[in-house]
Image: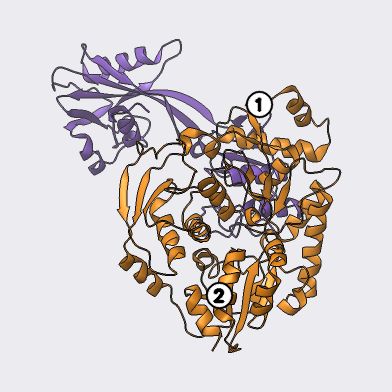
Amino acid sequence: MHLTKDEEHVLAGEEGAARQKAMELLVSLGDIYGAERLIPVKSAQVSGASFKTIGDAGIQWLEDMSEGTRASVPSMVNPLGLDMRRWRSMGVSPDFHGKQARIVAAYRSMGLLPVYSCTPYLAGYRPRRGQHLAWAESSATVFANSYIGARTNREGGPSALASAIIGKSPEYGLHLDENRLPKVEVNLPSVPEGLVPLAGYTAGKVAGNRIPLISGQAFAEDEHKSFGAAMAATGAVSMYVSKGTVGHVRSRGIDRSMIEERVTISSRDLRRCAEELSGDDEWDLVAIGCPHSSTRELAHMARKLKNRRPRRNCDVWFCTSRMVHSRCPQHIATLRRFGKVLCDTCMVVAPIEEMYARTATNSGKAMVYLPTLGRQTASFRTTDQLLEAISR
Amino acid sequence: MSFLGGVDTSNGVVLDPECSLIGESVRGRILCFPFGIGSTVGSYAMYQLKLNKVAPRAIINRSAEAIVATGAIMSEIPMVDNVDTSLIKSGDRVVVDAANGTVEIRDVTERHVVTSILRNRGRVLILKRSDKVGSYRGSWAGVSGFVEKDEGDEEAARREIVEETRFTNARLSRRVPARGFRHNDSVWTVHPFLFDVSSRDVSIDWEHEAYAWILPGELKDYTTVPGLGAVMNDLLSRTSP
């Protein structure tokens, strides 16, 4: 990789050990992926924020890195293992909270923003088309690339932190035009109500590591959010192309020259998938908000629940970002009659296995992680089905 | 291998049943494996090994990927990639120079060997090694032999063809890059060649006891010297390796 004089100085350790290590990370990843240089990024988004996922080693690493280093671009953080204000009522142990607090302190001392969300683009940090980013959260990466048309690889936690510190990322993968072309067309002629997350779940399996061109039914913004999140959870790809989004390379029309396969996912396929993922009818927890709910989604749920009463047959989590939470106090008040509205965290990275065994969700992404990382019996239901189930 | 869940971070013992090192500790050793797999959290698991003082001394990979490379830098473990890891066996003494990206296997001698595949109208010649030769008796092979001192590899290939088959007008069709194979304390560096010959009249010498003209797909029915299938694949595949 070709480095500038300044970058060479950082790599030689002239600006301290932590910046040196950050530069080493970026340079060796650049070498592995054949990047020729580092390019500036507008923002970073760092994963590896919950004590549950990074453990004691993660705390130590962040505390070591935080000595004398500051982020040099606006940098957000992924959800934590708890709501910073309501962790006790969530049922999180003081021990876990203590460890989580050290992680938060390390990120804060490096100047990272206290935005603990998988949807920074809804929380005041929306990138623009064409901007280069170093984001780590898979669902945010796919949204930024596909819906917004920004450019980021799916970074690992340490490499995103390195980019936050250095302000640059190696130029390879989705930063380059030639790697943003769709290779497989996934046709979704009609997606039944509430099953957009499962369309993403199925499309991710079809796509594998190829960028899919999604044709057929058009999605609204929130549908893109849940579609992409599920697709990035079952597939190894951080971008798709579709009408009505701007991620593709050419400003006029979509380049189909690389399409090697066409697959149709019918409404019948999606209903069968919903059936296969339907799991149990008995739940300890209903978890909504993976990715974090938008204002529109909270409003939709509040409207549906407004004139109903809680059943109190199980716990309910509505997960969102603190920024969105602060924007709609009336909706929040309605939802709080039915369960907990949690910020800074979600069902995927909270220590859910210490509190529950059976969880129902409307998220295709959570259906991937709840059974593995969360050790749950997971049941998929549409949003409206869940709202029906928790109210009367 | 995967470091997350694949290695016990308290003592460095490999837990992954898919990994041939299961039950052994990576602590203080040079860890050699083709490539890493699994979740990005694997990098933190490597850092945990370092904190617990049970990390490997160095890592050798065939192809580095992001998770292991990130973990190695976090943990300050020297790492070299682009190494043919099949040449290294558990228990070898190995010198790793991460600054220059080199790996030296001690106590092993490298021997250069030529292997030529002779082709005639779609069939290829294989030879059964006699019981008078020093290695791989009874196995089927191409036309092969050591490269002598001060001899070029193509020169050696042509000399062996004349000695072992009596073909004097073999026409070189293709050569592909050498491949290494580990055999006990030797690394055979095999230089593969493909020659076309104008007949199937073969006259074998003492080194062989039989020969056969086969279709390339039939090779799997024969017990061969190690790597003959891979060499033949390289030579006969349509695209250049």
Write down the chain letter for disc 1: B
Q: Position of residue A247 (x, y in %)?
A: 49, 43
Residue drawn at the location 58% of the way across and 85% of the way down: A307
Task: Tell me the crowding category of disc 2: few under 14, some 14 to 19, or many 20 or more residues within 10 angstroms, Cα based.
Answer: some
Which color has been applied to chain A in this rendered view?
A: orange
Task: Tell me the crowding category of disc 1: few under 14, some 14 to 19, or many 20 or more residues within 10 angstroms, Cα based.
Answer: few
Residue drawn at the location 24% of the way across and 30% of the way down: B127
Foreground residue among A164 and A337: A337
Dot 1 and dot 2 within a common chain: no
Q: Position of residue B154 (x, y in %)?
A: 35, 14
Foreground residue among A93 and B53: A93
Gap between marks 1 and 2 measured at Cα: 48 Å
Asked which secondary structure carries label 2, the reply is loop
Foreground residue among B165 and A245: A245
Foreground residue among A206 and A310: A310
Q: Which mark is residue A326?
A: none
Which color has been applied to chain B in this rendered view?
A: purple
Q: Is residue A90 above or below residue A251?
A: below
Q: Which residue in the protein does label 2 denote?
A: A376
**Residue B56 visible, this angle:** no
Q: Position of residue A225 (x, y in %)?
A: 53, 58
Q: Which residue in the protein does label 1 denote?
A: B100
Q: Is residue A374 above or below residue B212?
A: below
Write down the chain letter for disc 2: A
Indicate the amino acid at tag 2: Gln
Residue drawn at the location 51% of the way across and 79% of the way down: A386
Indicate the amino acid at tag 1: Asn
Asked which secondary structure carries label 1, the reply is loop
Foreground disc of the pair 1, 2: 2
Total labels: the figure holds 2
Residue B192 in the figure: left or right of residue B59: left
